[in-house]
Image (tube, helix red, strand yellow):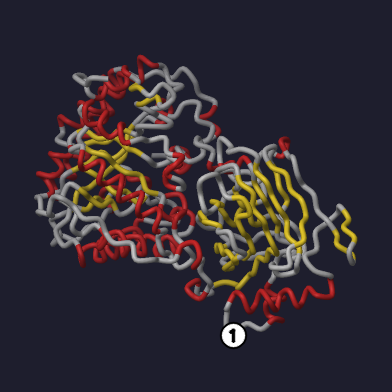
């Protein structure tokens, strides 16, 4: 594939769903951008100062103590601060109002109260942002720390949900680490988010943001500080959100069926027809906001699907020590149980490909941390539960680095799951062109190899400006010529030849085409891919149930019948 095609894979789905717009929201919809000055007992609408300016050093001393970062002294904390700790959050979004309040219980005695009148369509419909005021250099480890409390949590709940990140201050608002979902409690606490600069940034080009519109809620915020620890700092030494993500005793689920090892080829045959689910559903942050409901498991099974590839973006649900949020684990437990009860196979797909493509070093730590927790948790699950180490490794995660990480992760899995089938694909977005570079341990027979297929991108991603400017200009591209069919046959023959030479079964983990493509050609392409996969003995999973490239219309709560029947001709919608 050419560079344009590979870059298109990089942005294929996340930006179409709006991830690239998380950040400052639309400045044209700004409702609040107030700052204040507190001089004595007089408040001026200009800038918020949490304490009188001479007390700034005292504020940083307090932060130094609260952060529990040893052996830093107050002077070191001051020198490492790269924002203005005396500034308030800049708030944008028409659903929000903000005011300054006095609160003696918070450091500095003054807080900013932000009220979100109603739940937004997206969490980032209300964003609080603070910029850096000093340059940051490539490789620098950054820590955001801020005081917060839930003044009025969402109705019926005890805690508010805030998604925090360090990010670019301009579009596409790319994060310098994972989004971190914080559960803010009723009392004042310090909350933390860390990240690593991927290049040099001038003052003001990056900063910290909070996404607040996940519910109607009111939160109070105290002082904010962004600390720069320089390159190579051990992130394990940074403080963690004990109040939010403390790993309480969360017992693993009990399964009705015991684990019984299945040959990889036999399991692949049983996987048959599948669909990707749950990757962008709000259920992972708040089950009460779930789009995907228990009835959908039943409908998927009744339509003739046999396998679910559960898309897990776990990095967003880890604390700064890379511990998975217990609430997120409970949600995952429920999803697995519901899928199994409906007779479906389940693939747990770690899907943080974008973050891994930007920073292979952080990715390695987080992926291994993920499997160190997930593998033992589900060691007693029936063999119908499979693990997929990482979706679409690419860019910074080169073939060499990916081979090393997949071996390390597999070794972690094998400690508790010695014979569970594990899915691994080649680098460069699981491209069939890179199968030859995939290095697997010859002694491990419980591996199923995956590849993804979106060829030709000019058809499957036409009009997708989020994929590339070139693709965004295309429309009306059709598919179905003799040459088109011949290329698909050649591609699948290539995969089959590799499979036979390496004695590995094949799972086509993703394929699909954009809604804006001509429907007649879409159906021809879908039908051709499915029939080619089945003729070559590959199991498959369509991308995706909902949303984007969808086979199911959530608004109407019904199958998109033409797409469903192209995939499974005998399906009952």
Residue at point 34%, 66% (across, down): 249
Q: Is residue 485 visible?
A: no
Q: Quadrant of the N terminus?
A: top left
Q: Position of residue 461 (x, y in %)?
A: 44, 29
Which residue is identified by label 1?
71
On the rendered structure, is 111 left or right of 198?
A: right
How many C-alpha atoms fall within 10 Å of the one at disc 1: few (<14), some, or many (≥20)?
few
Q: Quadrant of the C terminus?
A: top left
On the rendered structure, is 305 left or right of 558?
A: left
Q: Is residue 247 above or below residue 570?
A: below
Mark 1: which secondary structure? Answer: loop
Residue at point 18%, 52% (across, down): 255
The answer to which of 278 and 40 lies nearer the viewer is 40
Q: Position of residue 352 (x, y in %)?
A: 41, 51
Q: Is residue 152 above or below residue 7?
A: below
Q: Quadrant of residue 176?
A: bottom right
- Of all residues, the one furthest to the front in this rendering is 156
On the rendered structure, is 275 left or right of 538?
A: right
The answer to which of 345 and 461 lies nearer the viewer is 345
Q: Is residue 513 above or below residue 219?
A: above
Q: Quadrant of residue 252?
A: bottom left
Residue at point 38%, 28% (across, down): 550
């Amino acid at each position: 594939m050419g560079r344009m095609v590979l870059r298109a894979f990089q942005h294929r789905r996340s930006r179409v769903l709006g991830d690239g717009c998380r950040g400052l929201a639309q400045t044209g919809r700004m409702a609040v951008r107030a700052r204040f000055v507190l001089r004595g007992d007089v408040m001026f609408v200009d800038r918020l100062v949490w304490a009188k300016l001479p007390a700034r050093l005292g504020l940083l001393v307090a932060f130094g103590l609260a952060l529990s970062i040893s052996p830093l002294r107050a002077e070191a904390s001051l020198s490492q601060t790269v924002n203005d700790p005396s500034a308030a959050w800049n708030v944008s979004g028409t659903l929000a109002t903000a005011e300054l309040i006095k609160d003696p219980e918070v450091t500095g005695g003054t807080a900013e109260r932000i009220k979100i009148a109603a739940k937004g369509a997206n969490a980032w419909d209300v964003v609080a942002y603070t910029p850096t005021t000093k340059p940051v250099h490539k490789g620098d480890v950054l820590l955001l720390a801020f005081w917060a409390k839930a003044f009025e949590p969402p109705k019926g709940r005890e805690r508010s949900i805030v998604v925090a990140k360090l990010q670019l201050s301009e579009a596409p608002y790319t994060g310098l680490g994972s989004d971190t979902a914080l559960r803010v409690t009723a009392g004042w606490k310090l909350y933390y988010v860390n990240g690593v600069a991927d290049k040099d940034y001038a003052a003001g080009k990056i900063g910290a943001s909070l996404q607040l519109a996940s519910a109607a809620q009111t939160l109070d915020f105290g002082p904010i500080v962004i600390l720069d620890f320089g390159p190579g700092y051990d992130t394990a030494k940074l403080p963690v959100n004990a109040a939010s993500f403390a790993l309480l005793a969360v017992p693993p689920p009990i399964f009705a069926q015991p684990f019984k090892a299945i040959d990889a080829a036999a399991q692949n045959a049983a996987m048959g027809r599948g669909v990707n689910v749950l990757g962008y559903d709000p259920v992972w942050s708040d089950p009460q906001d779930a789009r995907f409901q228990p009835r959908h498991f039943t409908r998927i099974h009744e339509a003739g699907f046999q396998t679910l590839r559960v898309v897990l973006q776990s990095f967003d649900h880890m604390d700064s020590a890379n511990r998975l949020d217990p609430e997120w684990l409970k949600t995952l437990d429920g999803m697995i149980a519901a899928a199994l009860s409906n007779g479906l196979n389940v693939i747990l797909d770690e899907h943080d490909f974008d973050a891994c493509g930007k920073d292979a070093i952080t990715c390695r730590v987080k992926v291994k941390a993920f499997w160190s927790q997930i593998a033992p948790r589900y060691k007693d699950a029936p063999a119908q539960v499979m693990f997929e180490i990482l979706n679409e490794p690419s860019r910074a995660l080169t073939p060499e680095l990916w081979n090393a990480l997949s071996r390390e992760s597999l070794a972690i899995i094998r400690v508790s799951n010695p014979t569970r089938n594990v899915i691994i694909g080649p680098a460069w977005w699981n491209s069939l062109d890179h199968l030859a570079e995939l290095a697997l341990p010859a002694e491990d027979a419980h591996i199923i190899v995956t590849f993804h297929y979106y060829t030709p991108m000019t058809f499957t991603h036409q009009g997708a400006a989020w994929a590339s400017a070139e693709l965004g200009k295309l429309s009306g591209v059709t598919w179905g010529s003799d040459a088109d069919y011949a290329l698909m046959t050649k591609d699948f023959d290539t995969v089959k030849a590799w499979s036979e030479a390496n004695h590995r079964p094949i799972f086509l983990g993703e394929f699909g085409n954009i809604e804006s493509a001509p429907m007649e050609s879409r159906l021809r392409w879908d039908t051709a891919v499915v029939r080619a996969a089945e003729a070559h003995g590959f199991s498959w999973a369509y991308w995706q149930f909902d949303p984007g490239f969808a086979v199911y219309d959530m608004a109407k709560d019904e199958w998109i019948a033409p797409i469903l029947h192209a995939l499974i001709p005998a399906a009952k919608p």
